[in-house]
Image (tube, rainbow, N blue to C red):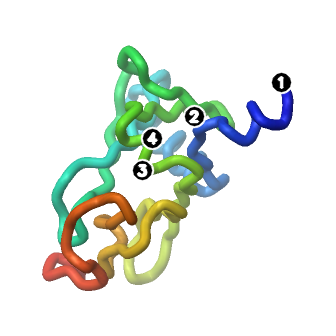
Amino acid sequence: MDLLEQTNVETINLTDAAVNTVKSLLVQKEVPNHGLRVFVSGGGCSGLQYGMALEAEPRPYDHVIEKGGVKVFVDPTSMMYLNNATIDYEDSIMGGGFKIDNPNAVSSCGCGTSFKTADSQGAAGGSCSSCG
């Protein structure tokens, strides 16, 4: 593969904390061979929102990314918004959860579950009545 092909690869990055948390969830839910579906849907206070679910297998045309034995499934439309994003898991005294660092987002909700890109329509973002 030449350098041009390498720079055009669509991907999502997972931190070690995210990989370990997904592995733990798969064991807890007794679905060790499932993967993590990551998607973007309309809605949220900034126009688009992130979603995640455990699924048995990829759908046709999905991007499948593997890291540390964890499979991530992303549909082509969501990949347009999530390309090169990093999924992390943070555990704190105030509560933990998955966090997405998305280089494609120009603004995001205060709680980080909703975002806006330069090409998307939606609210200005930055605050959300459901953050808390």
* Spot occupied by residue 50 in the image (x, y as percentages of width and height): 32, 54
Few, some or many residues within 10 Å of mark 1 (<14, 14–19, 20+): few
Q: x, y percentage for residue 61?
A: 42, 19
Q: Which residue is mark 3?
A: 81
- In the image, 121 versus 59, the foreground residue is 121
- Residue plotted at (24% across, 48% down): 41
Q: CA distance from mark 4 to mark 1?
A: 22 Å
Could you say whether the residue bearing mark 1 is in a helix, strand or loop? loop
Real-space CA distance between mark 3 and mark 4, rounded to the nearest whole angstrom: 5 Å
Residue 70 marker? 2
Looking at the rendered image, the quarter that the N terminus falls into is: top right
Q: Give the answer, above or below, for where 61 lies relative to 9.
A: above
Residue sitting at x 39%, y 65%? 118
Q: Position of residue 99 (x, y in %)?
A: 46, 64
**Residue depth check, mark 4 versus mark 2: number of the one nearer the observer:** 4
User: Three-letter amino acid code at disc 1?
Assistant: Met
Per the rendering, the mark at residue 79 is 4
- N-term-proximal mark, 2 vs 1: 1
Q: Mark 3: which amino acid?
A: Tyr
**Front: mark 2 or 1:** 1
For residue 74, side relative to residue 40 (left or right): right
Q: Is the residue under label 1 in contact with that under label 2 (CB below 8 Å)?
A: no
Q: Are marks 3 and 4 in contact (CB under 8 Å)?
A: yes
Identify the residue shown where x is 35% and y is 28%. Answer: 55
Q: Which residue is mark 1?
A: 1
Q: Residues within 10 Å of mark 3 (few under 14, many from 20)?
A: many
Looking at the rendered structure, the kind of residue marked 2 is: Val
Image spot of residue 83 (x, y percent)? 53, 47
Q: CA distance from mark 3 to mark 1?
A: 25 Å
